Amino acid sequence: MGILDIEVWAKDSKKHQERLGTCKVDISSLPLKQDNCLELPLESCSGALLLLITLTPCAGVSISDLCVCPLADPSEREQIARRYCWRNSLKDLKDVGILQVKVLKAVDLLAADFSGKSDPFCLLELGNDRLQTHTVYKNLNPEWNKVFTFPIKDIHDVLEVTVLDEDGDKPPDFLGKVAIPLLSIRDGQSNCYVLKNKDLEQAFKGVIYLELDLIYNPVKAGLRTFTPKEKRFLEDSRKLSKKILSRDVDRVRRITVVLWNTVQFLKSCFQWESTARSAVAFVVFLATVWNFELYMIPLALLLLFIYNFLKPTKGRVSNVQEGQESTDVDEEEDEDDKESEKKGFIERIYMVQDIVSTVQNILEEVASFGERIKNTLNWTVPFLSLLACLTLAGATIALYFIPLRYIILIWGINKFTKKLRNPYSIDNNELLDFLSRVPSDVQKVQYAELKLCSSQSPVRKKRSAL
């Protein structure tokens, strides 16, 4: 370990960047597995940077050839499986599991060079871990045959595999991408994935062959679900798009329609538009209110989960579509006025863009929140829905046997003493942390695996249809 160089940058609405200052940290002098709170003065400017650094040995990250595949050795696989068995569920809660990815080959890639070839390599991203293969030059059907091992911190992470074309000193060209949720992995099977475009919504040219193997502890994974989700360090800023804005408006409209229909249904029960329905609703209301106990709230939600699990699967999946050098003083003043007007006009354009972008982000959050609740109830991700059922069952039993004041007392003591027990803990809402793991309808489309046509590639099929 050596010196960690840190740069602080400022970015305004015009996408202009300015470096504010730098500082250095000697990593070798810091103790391992301990929270280190540092206040570092910035060089070349006033101010300081407050950091919380924790050094943890990174176990499990590796790159190797197929001949030295870690999980291929039975003894090593058994040792790893024992590390994540049920008996070790409460040991090192941050170490949830291990993922092994065999990047075998790609077929029929897009030609990115004038020569009709490409120089492809693979970039693998899991959370904030990024690994890549070597480059295979002048080839549209590259074979990498590399094995990558990742430590799992969150079972709800998504493995992103991007195929890129090396282009010298220029940024690499995009050749296709796939996103694979960890919970959808079928262990040990060699799968052929159709490459998608950058938005992960449509098929791109070519396919990639991967073999995935996942070992994890379900208890650790479940407990990790109710903690804040790790933010991506490298994340593309959302772009203003008429298509995305229109899609988000439509998503919010659909949620609004569902809520409106529910309100109208309840209203019709009070107005006796249907005698039978209103009579049943009246009896249910009387029985519920007369016999109501607090434990019935999580019990009712639990019954709703069971009902959605037992009903036919049809309809669960929803699709989302979406100058002169010499002049006199007067001329100079006129030019200054014009320049000022031009700058003012540009400022207004950027202001409108910021407002529309903010509205787009708000619509995205509202729509995603509603869709995540729906997808939890619809068992879109069985692991999460089952975890919700277990939580509701526990809440029902607790509310039935334990007085409410004791539960509120335990909750309050936990909240008040959280910062005392762990000064660097992040304040969080467990329900929102849970819902952040549930995919929205847009993410369901992005994570869906496309079926490969045996006779032709997806792009050729699309062109032939035209």
Image: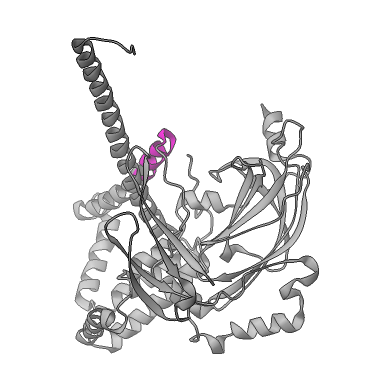
Q: Is residue 238 left or right of residue 418?
A: right
Q: How many marks?
A: 0
Q: Nearer the viewer, residue 449 or 35?
A: 35
The residue that appears at 33% across and 13% down in the rendered structure is: 325
Which quadrant would the C terminus be assigned to in this image? top right
Question: Residue 357 in magenta?
Answer: no
Q: Is residue 141 left or right of residue 238?
A: right
- Examine the rendered structure and indicate whether residue 299 appears above or below residue 123: below
Residue 26 locus on image (x, y percent): 45, 71
- Examine the rendered structure and indicate whether residue 358 appears above or below residue 323: below
Q: Quadrant of residue 61?
A: bottom right
Instruction: Point out the residue furthest to the right here.
Output: 67
The residue that appears at 56% across and 86% down in the rendered structure is: 86
Residue 367 locus on image (x, y percent): 36, 49
Specify the principal SS of the magenta part: helix
Instruction: Point out the residue furthest to the front here.
Output: 326
**Magenta region: which residues?**
241-252
The residue that appears at 76% across and 78% down in the rendered structure is: 73
- Examine the rendered structure and indicate whether residue 274 appears above or below residue 332: below
Residue 344 locus on image (x, y percent): 24, 27
**What colour scheme governs how the chains and residues are painted in the rendered image of this protein?**
one colour
Q: Quadrant of residue 83?
A: bottom right
Question: Residue 249 in magenta?
Answer: yes
Q: Is residue 384 visible?
A: yes
Q: Is residue 257 visible?
A: no
Which quadrant would the N terminus be assigned to in this image? bottom right
Q: Is residue 13 left or right of residue 221?
A: left
Q: Nearer the viewer, residue 138 or 184?
A: 138
